[in-house]
Amino acid sequence: MRKKQGFRWNHMTMGTCYYPEHWDKALWQEDLRRMKTAGISMIRVAEFAWSKVEREEGVFDYTFFDEFLDLCQREEMKVIFGTPTATPPAWLTEKYPEVLNAREDGVLYRHGGRRHYNYNSEKYLELSARIVEKIAAHYGKHPAIIGWQIDNELNCETSEFYSEADSLAFREFLKEKYHTLSALNEAWGTVFWNQTYTAWKQIYVPRPVLNQGYNPHMHLDYFRFISESTVHFCQMQADIIRKYKKEADFITTNGIFWNLDNHRMMDECLDVYTYDSYPSFAFGLNCDPQKSDDLNDRHWSKKLTEVRSVCPHFGIMEQQSGANGWTTRMEGPAPRPGQLTLWAMQSVAHGADYISFFRWRTCTVGTEIYWHGILDYDNRDNRKLAEVKDFYKKLKTLDEVCGAEYTAAFGVLKDYDNCWDTNVDVWHKRVDQASDEEIFAAAQLYHTPYNVIYLQENTTPEDLLAYPLLIYPHPVLMTEKRAGLLRKYVEQGGMLVIGCRSGYKQENGKCVMFPQPGLLQELTGSDVIDFTFTSPAEPPVFAEWDGRKIDMPLFNDILRPLEGACVLASYTDSYYKGEAALIEKKTGKGRALHFGSTFSRSNMEMLLRYAGVIRPFDDLLEAPEEVEIVQRVKNENRYLFVLNYMPAAKKINLKKQMRLLYDGTLHTGEVILKPFETAVYKVL
Ligand code: GLA
């Protein structure tokens, strides 16, 4: 069982990101007042402002934020205060270059960007701890502050670390894990290509090797090490802030990035998680929305599903309000009228009770002059501000939805070991990504919402039994413990589905010498007698299931049933025509299925139907594929979010009487949603 999140919003709340250091002080008061008029009652500040407090080494001056926070207090604006460690000052990186992160080839990232530090330099840990302590001690009891943000987007910009300090710390991490070099050599299979280590000092974080012939088992431990380093850095700051903050104030961080066990970081360090949501990335350079089959901006619902997995009642620290872009990379168009609200409602639908728009006003200097905020450089009222105000009116009508639970019809299992192993496994990445995207697409198009559950050390069968159907798409790495957990889930009535490529590696990513799906074989009653990528030189492969053809794309496990199992579908193509493609075995009150391929939006339809979970809202409303339906539930009240992502009107049909929360009106039957329009109904 995971720890309960320590903080939840009691009311739907709106905020923005503000940078007092970017503006003339003469603007502050007017800015805060205009925010309040728009409905903004919370701001996030200070996350890049180290030099405003420690301009020279060891010389601390609090006057800048004292003045600003006092003004916030007078203007009744609540503040989330950021720790500034994402951007160390120039004096620091110049004097202590060992704090810098490096490229894989050892070249240091220099001052000027952000997040160019490493987590393992003793010096950086010391100076970060000191600035956090100074800030927390000085501002911790300030009445305007209600929360703290640690750093900014941990593991964004890069999630790989190659400094000298990282190699030293990596060795310590490995010593603690393996104790002896012979255990490490065994775990990493270093006998291959004569990689055998005879002294700890021969081990480094990955370095350039010819033809990318990296050792995958070392890489897996390297990602575990990065995650450990990141959590440690976050924990160090959280522990300091906790000593000084007011009891009720929360600690958070923003964004979800790579090579990081975000669940562990949430449980061990934070009270609540916040995310940064920028759906117009979907329309940026190199994207062709006409051809896209990943659902464009609606794809952000997939990211929000991941956030909900980390923290069910989260906040959005940065919600897109204008066009995306840096001077040096990327572009994304401005939200169309209605789209700003659509994207913010998408966040609320998926579990956000706090929406903070990035940023109050577009910066007039620096690399982010094209990362547009609510206001433009000219500071006049504009259509975006008008839409933010309108969004606030809608948000306030949703107050009773605050804290409501997202309803999932099924669950998708993941775990960090498999995610990180897949990162450096080109063979498997293609398989894994295809299923990940298609399961999402199927859930969206058939209006069958899901949750993602990451298997953790403390996951219990009860956690899993909340879902009648669990799909663990391709659990390549399998351990006795996880197999045991899955067995209990099935025995107690769950339906588990695994895809192709399951159970062929052990916990270090080494392949096991027993039949696939390895440790899951007894549960699924399936035996993989052969396997292959589908051949581009042959026609697509299908299987027949219950008289229907289902596609078996990309990769095929050719199966045989073992005792007690039955064949549900067989291949109709290729050299394995007639062989089993889908096998089911009942155990206890439940059953496990081995599906011999990757998941696609069409084969998922059959699976969801077979499991009896498809289209759970059919008795309430009908909507076309282009419209997302989400349900949140609280105290037996059901709230339906209906989101039209199209620049065209869409028709929906309400089969019961419902109240539109935005204006309290009652509706049944046909309703037309305008382009980008959203609606939130309470089912009566
Ligand atoms: C992230 C960061 C912000 C800002 C935006 C735009 O979300 O957290 O500080 O840089 O990206 O680049």
Image (cartoon, helix red, strand yellow):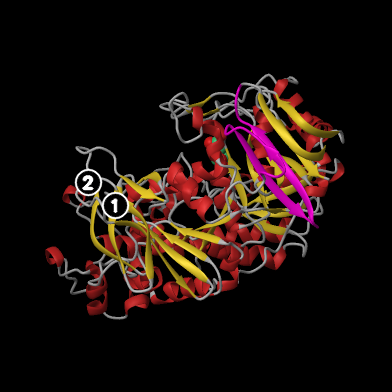
Q: Which residues are magenta?
A: 618-647
Q: How many marks?
A: 2
Q: Of 394 and 639, which appears nearest the observer?
A: 639
Q: Is mark 2 within 8 Å of ligand 1?
A: no
Assign a secondary structure to mark 1: strand
Query: In the picture, which quadrant includes the C terminus?
Result: top right
State yes or no: discs 2 and 1 in contact (Cβ < 8 Å). Answer: yes
Q: Which amino acid type corresponds to the residue marked 1 in the rendered image?
A: Asn
Work out whether mark 2 precedes mark 1 in sequence or the reverse, and give the earlier one: 1
Q: Position of residue 411 (x, y in %)?
A: 54, 57
Q: Position of residue 375 (x, y in %)?
A: 69, 25
Query: In the picture, which quadrant includes the N terminus?
Result: bottom right
On the picture, is 111 further left or further right than 575? right
Identify the residue position indicated by label 1 in the image: 556
Q: Residue at x 61, y 32 (%)?
A: 624
Identify the residue position indicated by label 2 in the image: 574
Image quadrant of ligand 1 equals top right
Q: Main secondary structure of the magenta part?
A: strand
Q: Position of residue 651 (x, y in %)?
A: 68, 27
